[in-house]
């Protein structure tokens, strides 16, 4: 943002109050924006829910320095206007603009001065979904410095493209695609908030380069990066909000669907549709809407990916189970199993498949249908197949705990729940968090038991950091 953005009377007053909530409110409602930024959209940037942001804006001043620092960086508040010191300032006492890299060279984007002067301060990544206009602001210097030679020690094709020293070509797009793929591979293993900034950068880079991309293959490849980064951003926003920010997540998935349709990529379109179905099924708890989306995803990928078609049918089975239709559920499970039996190494979505998925979803189906013994058997199989801590593993272990609880097996339920909490503490997955808290509520009738006290202590600790 231009420095004048921070010099208005309203913004000065907010900053002088030492109250980050007031600063965020002033930022959202600033006349600089064409329209006020919705609270849920800004909450997504912060990695919190709309409800949490509302409390922060209206409540007492936040004292958590880590959060203050994170949000100051997110909003790009000039350091000299802050009432607290950023980490590098505490360590060096210097101005961040004067910091040098390991070779004692000033940090730079590599731009010529005349090019720098012509660039806007911020690139707004636009979304226009069903008539709703949403934007993700990404500072131009962040986009450029993310690709500068000081980051890697060498100048790449993407560096040149971002600095406008050369045109955008396939090599530069491939580098950007690889970065998004690397972030996507981390999604199931680390907190989503740790990936949001870099994924937002990738979306900003796509927007920055799109106007200069030549038509043909290069533009198609850039649109493919947009599909991947928008899908990932939707996952991150929804997960970081503990599966509560449905609107923003759907907007990103719709952006990915539109990009996929533009270039005719049925697999990518189906993947984004499938992710959108999760919002309906597990966020809004609307199995009818979720079933329609899973069936649309399965039909979209029917001729392009057995993996995605099988996954869509698995979640269709769970939607039928939520609706209490055991016959339709078993039919969908059988069709999913058939699709998985046809998977070949050339499947574009092969990386999305894991051997425990069928047991994980079948176990969840039987939980909804009240067949707790069958659920336990399937979920135990899925748990045995777990090789490392990940977000889907927390869901398996949480559901396994529920299957034990509903059979009155308190010790086994507590043991599984402790394992689920271990994973949630490491990954902060929204789905896992929701399930362990569901299990905690079902433990209430045993609340006098010592094993339950231990679980509740850990759940309280989770709540304090959620």
Image (cartoon, rainbow, N blue to C red):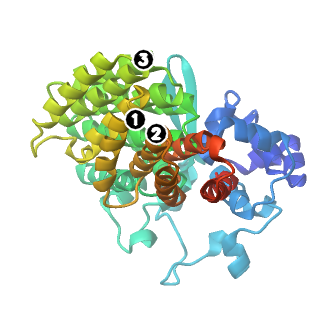
Percent coordinates x, y for residue 60 in the rendering: 87, 48
**Mark 2 — residue?**
407
Instruction: Give the alpha-carbon distance from disc 1 to disc 3, as whole Å.
Output: 17 Å
The correct choice, above or below, for 101 with respect to 294 in the image is below
Question: In terms of secondary structure, where does tag 2 sit?
Answer: loop
Q: Are marks 2 and 3 in contact (CB under 8 Å)?
A: no
Name the residue at 35% across, 67% down: 155
**Mark 1 — residue?**
372
Q: Nearer the viewer, residue 439 or 174?
A: 439
Name the residue at 88% across, 43% down: 9
In the image: residue 241, left or right of residue 60:
left
Name the residue at 54% across, 30% down: 246
Q: Mark 1 vs mark 3: which is more N-terminal?
A: 3
Dot 1: few (<14), some (14–19), or many (≥20) neighbours within 10 Å? many
Percent coordinates x, y for residue 54 in the rendering: 76, 37
Q: In the image, which is nearer the foreground, mark 2 or mark 3?
A: 2
Instruction: Give the alpha-carbon distance from disc 1 to disc 2, as whole Å.
Output: 7 Å
Dot 3: few (<14), some (14–19), or many (≥20) neighbours within 10 Å? some
Q: Mark 1 vs mark 2: which is more N-terminal?
A: 1
């Amino acid at each position: 943002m231009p420095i004048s953005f921070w010099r208005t009377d309203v913004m000065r007053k907010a900053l002088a109050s030492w109250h980050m909530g007031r600063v965020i409110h002033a930022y959202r409602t600033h006349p600089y924006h064409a329209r006020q930024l919705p609270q849920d959209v800004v909450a997504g940037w912060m990695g919190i829910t709309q409800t949490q942001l509302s409390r922060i804006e209206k409540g007492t001043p936040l004292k958590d320095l880590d959060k203050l620092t994170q949000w100051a960086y997110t909003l790009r508040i000039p350091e000299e206007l802050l009432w607290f010191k950023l980490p590098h300032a505490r360590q060096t006492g210097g101005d961040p603009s004067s910091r040098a890299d390991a070779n004692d060279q000033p940090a730079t984007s590599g731009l010529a001065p005349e090019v720098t002067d012509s660039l806007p301060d911020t690139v707004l990544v636009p979304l226009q979904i069903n008539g709703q206009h949403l934007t993700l602001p990404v500072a131009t210097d962040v986009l450029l410095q993310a690709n500068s030679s000081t980051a890697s020690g060498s100048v790449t094709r993407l560096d040149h493209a971002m600095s406008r020293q050369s045109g955008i070509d396939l090599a530069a797009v491939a580098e950007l695609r690889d970065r998004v793929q690397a972030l996507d591979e981390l999604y199931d293993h680390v907190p989503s908030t740790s990936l949001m900034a870099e994924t937002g950068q990738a979306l900003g880079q796509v927007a920055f380069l799109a106007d200069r991309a030549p038509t043909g293959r290069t533009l198609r490849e850039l649109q493919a990066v947009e599909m991947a980064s928008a899908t990932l951003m939707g996952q991150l926003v929804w997960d970081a909000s503990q599966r509560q920010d449905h609107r923003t997540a759907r907007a990103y998935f719709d952006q990915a669907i539109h990009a996929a349709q533009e270039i005719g990529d049925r697999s990518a379109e189906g993947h984004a549709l499938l992710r959108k179905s999760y919002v309906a099924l597990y966020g809004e708890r609307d199995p009818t809407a979720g079933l329609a989306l899973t069936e649309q995803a399965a039909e979209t990928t029917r001729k392009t990916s057995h993996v995605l078609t099988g996954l869509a049918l698995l979640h269709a089975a769970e939607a039928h189970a939520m609706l209490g239709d055991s016959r339709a559920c078993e039919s969908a499970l059988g069709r999913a199993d058939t699709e998985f039996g046809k998977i070949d190494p050339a499947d574009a979505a092969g990386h999305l498949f894991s051997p425990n998925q069928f047991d994980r979803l079948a176990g969840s189906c039987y939980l909804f249908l009240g067949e707790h013994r069958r659920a336990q058997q399937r979920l135990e199989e899925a748990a045995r197949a777990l090789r490392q801590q990940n977000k889907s593993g927390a869901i398996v272990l949480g559901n396994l705990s529920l299957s034990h609880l509903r059979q009155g097996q308190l010790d086994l339920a507590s043991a599984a729940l402790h394992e689920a909490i271990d994973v949630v503490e490491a990954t902060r997955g929204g789905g896992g968090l929701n399930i362990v808290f569901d299990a905690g509520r079902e433990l209430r009738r045993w609340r006098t038991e010592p094993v339950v006290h231990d679980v509740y202590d850990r759940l309280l600790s989770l709540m304090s950091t959620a």
